[in-house]
Amino acid sequence: MTALLEVEGLVKHFVAARSVFGRPTAYVKAVDGVSFTVEAGKTLALVGESGCGKSTVSRLVLRLIEPDAGIVRFEGRDLGTLGANRLRAFRREAQIIFQDPYASLNPRMTVSQILTEPLALHDLVPAARRRERVEELLRLVGLEPRFARRYPHEFSGGQRQRIAIARALAVEPKLIICDEPVSALDVSIRSQILNLLHDLQNRLGLAYIFVSHDLAVVKHIADRVAVMNLGGIVEIGDAEALFAEPRHPYSRALLSAIPVPKPEAKRSRIVLEGEMPSALNPPSGCRFHTRCPYVIARCRTEIPLLLADGRRHATACHRIAELPAPGAIVPADGG
Ligand code: SF4
Ligand code: MG
């Protein structure tokens, strides 16, 4: 079975500085060879600290920006070769919701206008049926149909995110990129929105790319998890396996920061030393080597490849075979 979305060797470098003659002299290597697939009806979580390139990946997948290299295929079709009409159709099938629903909703439009706009734009529902469809969409996201006449400022953050989700659903997409959809919300509201997304996935067969800096947030919604560090995926695998036994030292550190409910299951916390290096001038070799507790000399010069260590699991670390079980800490050899 072909995956809904296939991303292969995606690269995007941004020019960060130019000489007086206008020639680029420095690049931010925002995305540097990223590959993954998303299956229909499933969730891939893209997790990493801010600046790791996950939002750039989202924009590349949606073709909001052009990659320098790499291929994105949607239902087997290479997006880079699509003409304007096909690309327009793709833009309907792949939607995005953002962290800040307030910024993404036009404050001068009523909810009804916000939800009608995409219906009209893509000519999906006859004008006479649009009001009905708007009410249906509101119910789908757990809002009352009478809210259609109100403006975004009349809603709470969680309700606004529901409206943004309804707008994405209006065009009946197959894929929704959820870019930190709960990060701006109160902790008490987060699980409601996560449950709604999960519920909608089951009812409508949606696939998600769920972008988050927080592994705890994706724990219950992800089928697959890709952990990103400075423009590259360092580990990718089934969520259950990755949460139970993270292999890459960076995944272990991210996971060890999540509080565990059962004290007897307590993991030793791996605290990352030093600041996250900048993607403008990333470390040589393994890009995690300046913060890795297991660093050896080889890590500073040789880039580790993302190698399969299991049928559905891959990790980019030179020391993967010799690392201790997750939870134990061995000191670096000082090399
Ligand atoms: Fe750490 Fe070396 Fe593995 Fe990178 S390659 S994660 S520095 S042990
Ligand atoms: Mg699911």
Image (cartoon, rainbow, N blue to C red):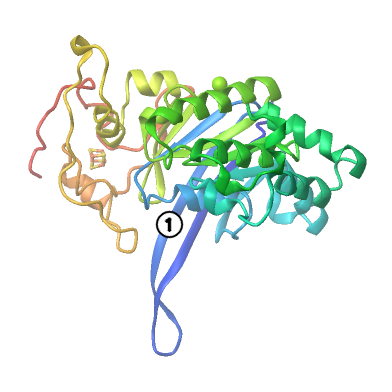
Residue receiving disc 1 = 30
Indicate the quadrant where residue 97 lies: top right
- Front residue of 50 and 181: 181
Indicate the quadrant containing the C terminus: top left, top right, bottom left or bottom right.
Answer: top left
Determine the residue positioned at 76% across, 32% down.
135
Determine the residue positioned at 29% across, 29% down.
255
Q: Is residue 59 left or right of residue 94?
A: left
Secondary structure, mark 1, is strand
Determine the residue positioned at 56% across, 57% down.
69
Q: Is residue 291 left or right of residue 79?
A: left
Is residue 17 visible in this depiction of the protein?
yes
- Front residue of 50 and 18: 50
Q: Is residue 258 left or right of residue 99?
A: left
Q: Could you tell me residue 12's position as x and y percent? A: 50, 59
Q: Is residue 8 left or right of residue 16?
A: right
Q: Could you tell me residue 297's position as x and y percent? A: 16, 46
Determine the residue positioned at 69% across, 49% down.
110
Name the amino acid type tagged 1.
Answer: Ala
Total label count? Answer: 1
The correct choice, above or below, for 68 with respect to 317 in the image is: below
The correct choice, above or below, for 124 with respect to 22 in the image is: above
Furthest toward the bottom, the residue is 21
Q: Could you tell me residue 89's position as x and y percent? A: 79, 47
